[in-house]
Image (tube, rainbow, N blue to C red):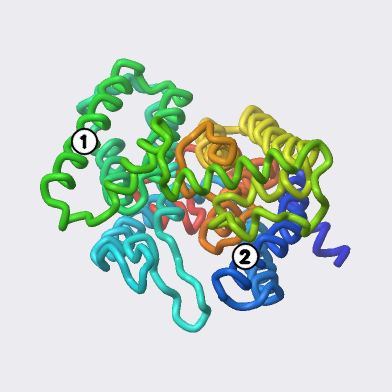
C-alpha cells in the first residue's frame, strides 16, 4: 500500500478533492437510492451502493492509469479517438428514440454488466483534447477563418449536431466550453462571434425541422421546449414537480440539515440519486453541507487554474482548462437546477451522483489534469515539444 501511494504523482490537492467527493458520495447515494427501491421497485439499497462503489473503484483505476501517461501523448490519442466517438454517436443515434421506455439514442448497452455507456460523455472529453491540440498548433500563427473551418469547426459541429437530438444540455455545454477554450487559446474573437451566430442558426433550423417533421426526433424538441416554458412560465408539469420537490427539500434542510439518511423528499423526488442529488444533500446536511460541497468544487477550479498556470507547454495549459472547466461547470449547473436558477437539464453532479459513464469520464478528465501536473512526465519528452502530429502512431510510440 505504501508503494502504491508512492507511485501516485501529480497535484495532491486534486487527488484529495476527488477522493473526498467520492467517499462522501456514498452517504447521499445510499440514502437517495431508497427511492429506486421502495417507490420504483428497482433492486435493493445495498445493491445500488455496491454498484456505485464498483463504478467509483473502476473510475479511480482510470485516474491512476491515465495520470501515468505523458501529456503530449494525448495529442495523438485525440486524433485516433475522435473518429471513433463520431462512429459511436452515429450508432446510438441510429438506434432510435426509445427502447423499453428509455432514450436509446444516448446509450450503448454493455452486455453482462447491467449498465450502459453514453458516448456523448466520451465525445466531450475527446473533443476538448482535440481543440486544445489545434489551438496549441496555431498559437503563434495568424490563422484565417477559412483555414480553421475544416480542421477545427467541422469536428466541433459534427459532434455537437450528433449529440443535439438526444441530449440538448450536453450539446450546449460542449459547444459553450469549446468557445471558452478557443477564447482562452487566443482564437480571434470576430471569428468566435461568427461561430456563435452559426450555432444559433443551426439550432433554429434544427428546431424548425423537428417541428415540421416530428417523426425525425420524436419527443425530444418537445421535451426541451416544455422545460424552458415551465421555467419561464410555471405550470403543472413534471419538470416543475421536480423543481418544487427540490426546493422543499432545500427549504426544510435549514442550516444544519435533518441528518444523514433522514431526507423525506427523496421518496417523492424523481432522479433523487442523480440529477437532483444536491437537493437531498442540502436537506440532510443543511446549508453547511451544501456550501461545503460547493467550496470543494470551487477549490477544484482553483487547483485546475494553478495546474494550468504551471504547465510547461501551451498544449498542456489548454488541455487542463479544456477538460477541467467542464467538470466544475457541470457541478454548478446541477446545483443551479436544484435551486431553480436554470431549467431542468439532466446533468449529474460529478463524482457524487450515481451513474457509470459520467463518473468514468470525469475520472478520465481528472487523470489528464494530474498527468499535466506531473512535472516528471512533462520532462519525459526531453524538453522537445514540437512533434509530428500528422503521424499519431509516432506520437504514441514516443519517437519524437
Q: Secondary structure at mark 2?
A: helix
Q: Crowdedness of circle 2 by 10 Å Cα count: few (<14), some, many (20+)?
A: many
Q: Residue furthest right?
A: 2
Where is residue 380? Give x, y as percent. 63, 47
Residue 116 vs residue 45: left or right? left
Q: Residue at x 37, y 56 (%)?
A: 80
Q: Residue furthest front?
A: 236
- Identify the residue position indicated by label 1 in the image: 202
Q: Is residue 298 above or below residue 334?
A: above
Where is residue 79? Give x, y as percent. 37, 51
Residue nearest the observer in this picture, 217 or 77: 217
Q: Quadrant of the N terminus?
A: bottom right
Question: Would residue 384 be seen by someone viewing this image from the given angle?
Answer: no
Q: Residue at x 23, y 38 (%)?
A: 150
Where is residue 358? Give x, y as percent. 53, 56
Q: Residue at x 31, y 58 (%)?
A: 89
- Identify the residue position indicated by label 2 in the image: 35
Q: Label 1, label 2: how many angstroms apart (C-alpha)?
A: 39 Å
Q: Residue at x 69, y 41 (%)?
A: 375
Q: Nearer the viewer, mark 1 or mark 2?
A: 2
Where is residue 61? Give x, y as percent. 66, 64
Earlier along the polypeptide chain: callout 1 or callout 2?
A: 2
Q: Secondary structure at mark 1?
A: helix
Question: Would residue 392 be seen by someone viewing this image from the given angle?
Answer: yes
How many numbered callouts? 2
Q: Residue furthest left?
A: 212
Quadrant in the rendering for residue 136: top left
Residue nearest the observer in this picture, 42 or 20: 42
Q: Residue furthest bottom?
A: 112
- On residue 224, the disc is none
Looking at the image, do the residues carrying marks 1 and 2 touch, with CB atoms under 8 Å apart? no
Q: Crowdedness of circle 1 by 10 Å Cα count: few (<14), some, many (20+)?
A: some
Amino acid at each position: 500500500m505504501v508503494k502504491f501511494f508512492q507511485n501516485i504523482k501529480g497535484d495532491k490537492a486534486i487527488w484529495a478533492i476527488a477522493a473526498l467527493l467520492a467517499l462522501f458520495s456514498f452517504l447521499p447515494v445510499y440514502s437517495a437510492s431508497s427511492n429506486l427501491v421502495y417507490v420504483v421497485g428497482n433492486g435493493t439499497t445495498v445493491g445500488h451502493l455496491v454498484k456505485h462503489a464498483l463504478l467509483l473503484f473502476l473510475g479511480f483505476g482510470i485516474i491512476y492509469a491515465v495520470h501515468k501517461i505523458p501529456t503530449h501523448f494525448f495529442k495523438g490519442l485525440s486524433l485516433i479517438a475522435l473518429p471513433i466517438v463520431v462512429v459511436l454517436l452515429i450508432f446510438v443515434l441510429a438506434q432510435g428514440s426509445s427502447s423499453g421506455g428509455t432514450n436509446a439514442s444516448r446509450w450503448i448497452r454493455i452486455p453482462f454488466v447491467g449498465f450502459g455507456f453514453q458516448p456523448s460523455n466520451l465525445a466531450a472529453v475527446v473533443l476538448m483534447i482535440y481543440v486544445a491540440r489545434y489551438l496549441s498548433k496555431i498559437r503563434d500563427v495568424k490563422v484565417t477563418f477559412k483555414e480553421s473551418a475544416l480542421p477545427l469547426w467541422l469536428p466541433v459541429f459534427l459532434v455537437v449536431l450528433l449529440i443535439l437530438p438526444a441530449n440538448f444540455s450536453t450539446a450546449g455545454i460542449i459547444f459553450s466550453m469549446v468557445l471558452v477554450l478557443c477564447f482562452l487559446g487566443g482564437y480571434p474573437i470576430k471569428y468566435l462571434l461568427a461561430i456563435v451566430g452559426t450555432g444559433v442558426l443551426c439550432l433554429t433550423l434544427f428546431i424548425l425541422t423537428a417541428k415540421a417533421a416530428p417523426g425525425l426526433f420524436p419527443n425530444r424538441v418537445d421535451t426541451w421546449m416544455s422545460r424552458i416554458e415551465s421555467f419561464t412560465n410555471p405550470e403543472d408539469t413534471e419538470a416543475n414537480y421536480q423543481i418544487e420537490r427540490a426546493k422543499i427539500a432545500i427549504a426544510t434542510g435549514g442550516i444544519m440539515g435533518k441528518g444523514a439518511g433522514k431526507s423525506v423528499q427523496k421518496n417523492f423526488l424523481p432522479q433523487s440519486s442523480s440529477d437532483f442529488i444536491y437537493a437531498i444533500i442540502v436537506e440532510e446536511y443543511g446549508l453547511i453541507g451544501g456550501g461545503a460541497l460547493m467550496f470543494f468544487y470551487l477549490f477544484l477550479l482553483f487547483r485546475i487554474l494553478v495546474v494550468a498556470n504551471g504547465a510547461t507547454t501551451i498544449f498542456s495549459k489548454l488541455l487542463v482548462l479544456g477538460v477541467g472547466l467542464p467538470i466544475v461547470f457541470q457541478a454548478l449547473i446541477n446545483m443551479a437546477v436544484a435551486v431553480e436558477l436554470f431549467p431542468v437539464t439532466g446533468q449529474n453532479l460529478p463524482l457524487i451522483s450515481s451513474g457509470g459513464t459520467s463518473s468514468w469520464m470525469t475520472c478520465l478528465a481528472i487523470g489528464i489534469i494530474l498527468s499535466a501536473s506531473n512535472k516528471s512526465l512533462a520532462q519525459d519528452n526531453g524538453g522537445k515539444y514540437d512533434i509530428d502530429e500528422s503521424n499519431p502512431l509516432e506520437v504514441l510510440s514516443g519517437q519524437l
